[in-house]
Image (cartoon, rainbow, N blue to C red):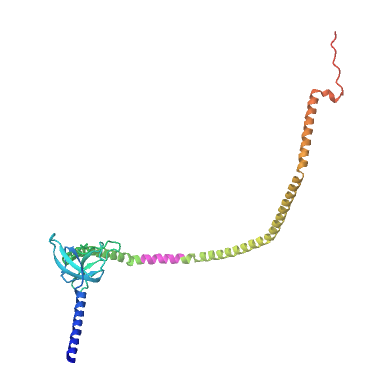
Amino acid sequence: MTTEAKVGAFVLGCFSILAFTLIYLVNAQYGGAKVPYRTYLRYAGGLEPGASVLFGGITAGKVTAVRPWKTDPTRIEILLDVEPGIPLNEKSVAKLGLVSIMNSAALSITTGSNDAKRLAPGSSIPSQEAASFDEIAGKMAAVADSANDLITQAKGELQGITGDARNLLGNLNDVTGPPTQQKVQAILNQVNGMVADDRPKIDRLSDQLVALSEHADTTVENVNGTVTDLREPMRRDMAELQNTLLEAKSLLANMQVMVRANDYKIDDTVDNLREATDNLDQLTDSLKQRPWSLIRIKQPKGRKVPQ
C-alpha cells in the first residue's frame, strides 16, 4: 500500500470517529431518556407542544402534547417529559405560567415538599387553574363599572360637602365681620382699663409677697440655728442614756449570776420558812384548844361532882 493510500485511510478513520462522537453527544443531549408525566387544566392559555416545563423556575423539560382529554372533554390533557432526577412529588402543583413577558406560555410546577412522596413516572401531577385573560378582562370591566358608580356617588357627596363648606365660610365671615371685631375691641379696651386700675394693687401685693418670702427665709434660718443648738445636748443625753442602759444590763447580769450561785441557799431558806409556818399553825391550833396554857403551865384538875 502506498503512502497516499495510508494517509487517506487514516483521515477517513478520524472523520468516522468524529462523526460517531458528534452523533452520540447529540443523542445524549436531545434524544436521551426522559421521564413522562401528565396533568390536566381547564384553560391551557396558548400552551403548545415544545413549550418549556419549569420546576421551581428552572427549565426541567418540554411539553410533548396538548389536547382535550377523552375522558372529560371539558379539561385539557397536557403530556410532558422532564429530565431524570427532577424531584416531582405529591405536593408539587402544575399551573399555567410564563418564562418571561416576551415569551410564550409555559407549564410551571412548584417544588412541593421534601417530605412528600415522589411521583412515579407516567403519573398525574396535581394542577391549579389560572385565571384566563377573558376572566381578568371581565373582572376589570366589573371594577370599572363599580368605579364609575363610585365616582358618581363621590361627585354627589362632594357637591354636598362644597355646599356645606360655603355655608361654613359664610358663617365665619359673619362671625368675623366688623360688628364682632368692634365687640372684641371693646372687650380688649375694658381688659386694658382693668389692668391699668389694678396695677398698683398688684404691685403692693408683689411687695408683700417679697417681704413675706424674706421673713420666711429668716424664720427658716432661726429654726436651723435652734436645731443646731439642740443637736449637741441631745447627742450627749443619748450617749449618757446608752451608758446607763449598758450599766443596767451589766447589773442584771451580775444579779442573775448571784441568784444562780445562791440557789441552794434560797431553797434552804424556803424550807425553814415552811417549817416555821407549820410550827405557827400548830401553835395557833393549840392556843385555840387550850388558851389557858398561856397563863398556866399545868392543866387544873377536874371538879368532882358533889354526892
Residue 287, percent from left and from top: 80, 25
Whether the magenta-drawn stretch holds residue 97 is answered as: no
Where 266 falls versus 29 (above or below)?
above
Of all residues, the one furthest to the front in this rendering is 1
Q: Nearer the viewer, residue 155 or 14?
A: 14
Measured as percent of width and height from the top left, residue 24 is found at 20, 77
Most common secondary structure along the magenta stretch: helix
Q: Where does the image place residue 133, in percent across and percent down from the top left?
A: 17, 67
Instruction: Please say whether residue 188 is one of the residues in the magenta stretch.
Output: yes
Residue extent of the magenta highlight = 182-194
**Whether residue 102 is visible:** no
The answer to whether 197 appears left or right of 137 in the picture is right
Dividing the image into 4 quarters, which one contains the C terminus?
top right
Q: Quadrant of residue 98?
A: bottom left
Q: Quadrant of residue 208?
A: bottom right
Of residue 123 and residue 129, the one placed in the foreground of this image is 123
Q: Residue 121 sits in which quadrant?
A: bottom left
Quadrant, the N terminus: bottom left
